[in-house]
Amino acid sequence: MIRGIKFVTVPVRDQEKALKFYTEKLGFQIRTDQPFGNQRWIELGIPGADTELVLFTSPGHEVLIGQFQPFVFWSSDVPKSYREMSAKGIEFLGPPKTEEWGTSAMFRDVDGNQFLLSSR
């Protein structure tokens, strides 16, 4: 039986720049960083979460860099996270919005990948 999601990948142009962004600005922790072909296999953990994020672009998938990524990060306080992340220089597409289902805001990483930050 499926027990969960082990990791999701984020396509990136420059793994070193992406690693710096995700560790220094978002606070993710390096779980694995090792050679993998012409790239590195970089797994990052979010403190307190089981699912990991992998900074890796599969050959032939470079067109996915800088696009909306089909998974959502969650925060227990989106407006507070928005303020803290903005203060670290993270670019948001707009301020948090509150809907019937919760509060969310869209942000970009160093490669222009877009992610939704949402309440749970």
Image (cartoon, grey):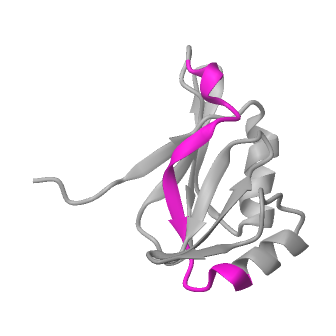
Horizontal side of 35 relative to 92 (left or right) equals: left
Observer-nearest of 54 and 62? 62
Residue 69 is inside the magenta segment = yes
Q: Is residue 84 above or below residue 73?
A: below
Q: Magenta part of the protein: which range?
A: 61-80
Observer-nearest of 41 and 52? 52
Q: Position of residue 39 (x, y in %)?
A: 65, 27
Q: Is residue 62 above or below residue 83?
A: above
Q: Is residue 6 above or below residue 42?
A: below
Q: Residue at x 74, y 49 (%)?
A: 19
In this view, which residue lies farthest toward the front? Answer: 100
Horizontal side of 36 relative to 39 (left or right) equals: left
Q: Position of residue 11 (x, y in %)?
A: 62, 34
In this view, which residue lies farthest toward the top? Answer: 60
Image-quadrant location for residue 30 = bottom right
Image-quadrant location for residue 78 = bottom right
Q: Residue at x 71, y 79 (%)?
A: 81
Image-quadrant location for residue 44 = bottom right
